[in-house]
Image: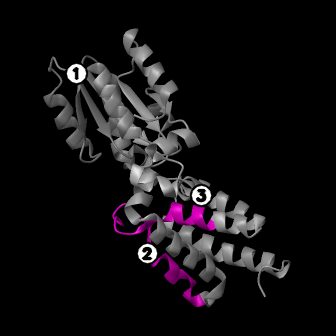
């Protein structure tokens, strides 16, 4: 695994000292390597590694109880736990009282804001660390080394790089440039059509990642000297990490506010018109 060295070292030390929590939460952006790190923990424990298909409490209960007496350690991963229902989170409280032996649960989340304080108090929370440019460079496939500069301009996690390479760097940048130019060029009633090719739900697997698009537009605005637009976009990027936010509404609001901000900045510059 590339990156997260200090986190891995602390987990290894906890295992050696017999102090690793049986319930952990890995906090970090999508694509930051939370599931990869959880698989590394399983390897350290010489354990079975199981990603639960969903966070429904009955699925979790049956799966864990079936292996409770196993002599082989098992690491169960609950992806995107912050998006689980309130009922599921409440039910997990009982499990945290019973955990022990060879059973470990690792929940992943973008933020702990939607996880109950009582649940957080029973878990050991690990925060994924930001990736350095050097670490991200190691994640770039050899076939895309010539695109390293453009990749590093908008990617902040290994998952981002994987997505961008799958899209095609040239194809994505052409799309992002067109979106950036159309933010102020198209009539306001047509601006929301820009989002048709952007993923705002987990099921939008065939669409472009909205955060990558916003980062690319932020870079274009920075190159054009539209610094207030840059600040505006960064504020929206932070909001995208909030699991409770309606991503479609957030994206629409970003487009409208970005349009207004760019128009205001263009009026006071020689870039347009």
| Magenta residue span | 189-217
Q: Can residue 226 be seen in this view?
A: yes
Answer above or below: position of 133 versus 70. below
Q: Residue 197 carries which label?
A: 2
Q: Mark 3 points at which residue?
A: 237
Instruction: Identify the residue at horizontal 34%, vertical 26% (top origin).
Output: 41
Disc 2 secondary structure class:
helix
Nearer the N terminus, badge 2 or badge 1? Answer: 1
Which residue lies most toward the top here? 17
Q: Name the residue under label 1.
A: 73
Disc 1 secondary structure class:
loop
Instruction: Identify the residue at horizontal 56%, vertical 79% (top origin).
Output: 178
Nearer the N terminus, badge 3 or badge 1? Answer: 1
Which quadrant, please, contains the C terminus? bottom right
Q: Which mark is residue 232?
A: none
Circles 3, 1 touching at the beta carbon (< 8 Å): no
Identify the coloring: one colour
Q: Is residue 44 magenta?
A: no
Disc 3 secondary structure class:
helix
Between marks 3 and 1, how big is the CA–CA gap?
A: 39 Å
Answer above or below: position of 70 versus 164. above
Relative to residue 76, is residue 173 drawn left or right?
Answer: right
């Amino acid at each position: 695994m590339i990156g997260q060295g200090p986190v891995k070292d602390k987990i290894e030390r906890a295992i050696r000292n017999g102090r690793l929590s049986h319930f952990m939460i890995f906090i970090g952006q999508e694509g930051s390597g939370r599931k990869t790190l959880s698989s590394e923990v399983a390897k350290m424990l010489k354990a079975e590694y199981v990603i639960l298909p969903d966070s429904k409490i009955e699925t979790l209960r049956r799966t864990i109880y079936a292996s409770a007496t196993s002599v082989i350690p098992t690491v169960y991963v609950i992806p995107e736990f912050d998006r689980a229902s309130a009922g599921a989170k409440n039910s997990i409280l009982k499990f945290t009282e019973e955990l022990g032996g060879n059973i470990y649960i690792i929940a992943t989340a973008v933020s702990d804001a939607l996880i109950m304080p009582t649940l957080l108090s029973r878990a050991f929370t690990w925060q994924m660390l930001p990736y350095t440019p050097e670490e991200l460079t190691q994640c770039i496939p050899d076939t895309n080394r010539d695109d390293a500069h453009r990749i590093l301009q908008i990617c902040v996690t290994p998952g981002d790089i994987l997505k961008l390479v799958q899209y095609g760097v040239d194809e994505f940048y052409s799309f992002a440039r067109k979106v950036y130019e159309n933010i102020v060029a198209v009539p306001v009633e047509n601006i929301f059509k820009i989002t048709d090719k952007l993923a705002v739900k987990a099921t939008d697997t065939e669409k472009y990642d909205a955060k990558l698009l916003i980062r690319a537009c932020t870079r274009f605005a920075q190159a054009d000297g539209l610094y207030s637009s840059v600040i505006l976009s960064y504020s929206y990027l932070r909001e995208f990490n909030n699991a409770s936010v309606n991503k479609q509404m957030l994206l629409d609001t970003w487009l409208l506010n970005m349009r207004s901000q760019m128009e205001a900045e263009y009026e006071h510059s020689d870039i347009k018109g």
